[in-house]
Amino acid sequence: MIPDTKLQVTGKIPEAYHYILSKEALEFLIFLESRFRNQRIRLINQRQEIQKAIDGGNLEKVLSSIPEIGGDWQIGNVPDDLQDRRVEITGPVDRKMVINAMNCGAKVYMADFEDATSPTWENIISGQINLYDAIRNQIDFTAENGKSYQLNTDHAV
């Protein structure tokens, strides 16, 4: 149980997770849950109703209920380091793959916590640890066959 709340982390929290699931990170999660709980629950219920309609063969009704996006709007400026996206790589967040992605020479690496990573508690938290270590240039990995992986210093973040 997180002190002074009704929130509880039910996954295992080994010592290695503590710098990802820090007191500040848990406080931020408490803030997000208290701020957005009702909206989150409403959206989950809405999503379930939409799925029921689709499963019932009412796809046209679902599609017709989606509002048009209109108006005069635009996004802000794209940062300079994201302007050149000719070569980018997307991949899983296991330690070896993060190192290989960072070393491959692509301009952008998108850590894929969705399609390329099975969303287990351990995979998500260890993926966060891997990115934490990678951006601090302190990531390495040794495979079962003894092959060693580390960040190339010329490609370091």
Image (cartoon, rainbow, N blue to C red):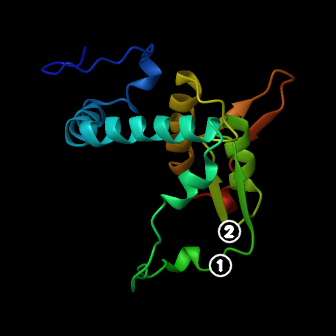
Is label 1 in contact with label 2 (beta carbons under 8 Å)? yes
Estimate the x, y position of residue 96 in percent, counting from the top left.
73, 37
* Rendering quarter of residue 40: top left
Q: Where, by quadrant of the figure, is residue 117 drawn?
A: top right
Residue, x 48% and y 58% (percent of image)?
A: 65
Label count reads 2
- The amino acid type of the residue labelled 2 equals Lys
Mark 1 is surrounded, within 10 Å at the Cα level, by few (under 14), some (14 to 19) or many (20 or more) other residues, namely few
The one nearer the camera, 132 or 50, is: 50
- The quarter of the image holding the N terminus is top left
The residue shown at (57%, 46%) is: 134
**In this view, 70 is above or below 89:** below
With 130 as the anchor, is 4 left or right in this view?
A: left
Is the C terminus in the top left, top right, bottom left or bottom right quadrant?
bottom right
- 27 on left or right of 111: left
Residue 84, label in figure:
1
125 or 142, which lies in front? 125
Across and down, in percent, residue 33 comes to: 26, 35
Q: Which mark is residue 107?
A: 2
Q: Position of residue 152 (x, y in %)?
A: 71, 53
Please report the residue visible at 68 percent of the width from the left and 54 percent of the height from the top: 102
Q: Residue furthest left?
A: 4
